[in-house]
Image: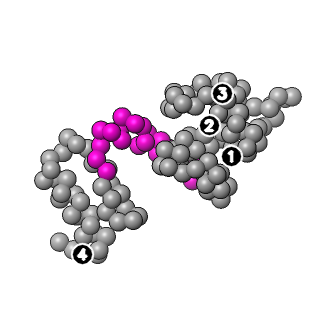
C-alpha cells in the first residue's frame, strides 16, 4: 500500500489538475468528502484510495457538480465506481473540451466528436446514434 503525506498527494494530483493544492487537500479531508486518513505506525497518511477519491472529485466538479452534491454522490458509490469516475478525468481536460465538439443526443446521451472528422461523417454518427436510441434499424 502506497502512503502519502498531504503535501505528496497534493503534488501527485497537481499533475492532473494544477488547481489542486495542499490547502484544498486538507479542506477536503476536513469536510469529510474523502475517507478518513489511515494510520501507518503513529502517523495518519493518505493512500491510493484517497488518490482515487480526489480524481473522482475533480472529474465531477468539472461536470458542474457542487461539492455538497459530490460528497453525497460519493457516499453511495463503491470503490470500483469511484475509480471509474476518476478514470474519466482525462475527458474533462480543458484543452480536450475546447478541441472537441460535444453533441447532446438525448437527456442521457452525449457524444463528443473530434473536429478532425468531416462534417458528413459527424452527421452520420449523430444520425446513427439517434436512430439506435429510437430503436430504428437502417
Which element carries disc 3, helix, strand or loop? helix
Q: Reading the chain from its start, which is encountered first: label 3 or label 1? A: 3
Question: Which quarter shows the N terminus?
Answer: top right
Q: In which quadrant of the rendered view does residue 133 lie?
A: bottom left
The mark closer to the camera, 1 or 4, is 1
Which element carries disc 2, helix, strand or loop? helix
Report the residue at 62% width, 43% height from top: 53
Q: Which mark is residue 136?
A: 4
Which element carries disc 1, helix, strand or loop? loop
Q: Residues within 10 Å of mark 1 (few under 14, many from 20)?
A: many
Q: Which mark is residue 33?
A: 1
Report the residue at 53% width, 45% height from top: 61
Q: Position of residue 74 (x, y in %)?
A: 63, 53
Q: Are marks 3 and 4 in contact (CB under 8 Å)?
A: no
What span is in magenta? 79-102
Q: Is residue 127 visible?
A: yes
Amino acid at each position: 500500500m502506497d502512503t502519502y503525506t498531504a503535501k505528496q498527494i497534493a503534488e501527485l494530483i497537481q499533475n492532473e489538475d494544477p488547481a489542486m493544492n495542499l490547502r484544498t487537500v486538507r479542506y477536503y479531508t476536513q469536510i469529510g468528502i474523502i475517507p478518513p486518513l489511515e494510520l501507518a505506525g503513529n502517523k495518519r497518511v493518505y493512500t491510493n484510495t484517497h488518490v482515487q477519491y480526489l480524481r473522482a472529485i475533480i472529474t465531477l466538479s468539472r461536470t458542474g457538480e457542487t461539492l455538497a452534491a459530490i460528497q453525497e454522490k460519493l457516499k453511495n458509490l463503491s470503490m470500483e465506481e469511484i475509480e471509474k469516475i476518476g478514470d474519466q478525468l482525462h475527458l474533462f481536460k480543458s484543452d480536450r473540451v475546447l478541441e472537441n465538439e460535444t453533441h447532446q443526443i438525448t437527456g442521457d446521451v452525449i457524444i463528443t466528436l473530434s473536429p478532425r472528422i468531416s462534417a458528413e461523417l459527424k452527421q452520420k454518427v449523430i444520425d446513427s446514434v439517434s436512430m439506435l436510441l429510437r430503436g430504428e434499424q437502417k
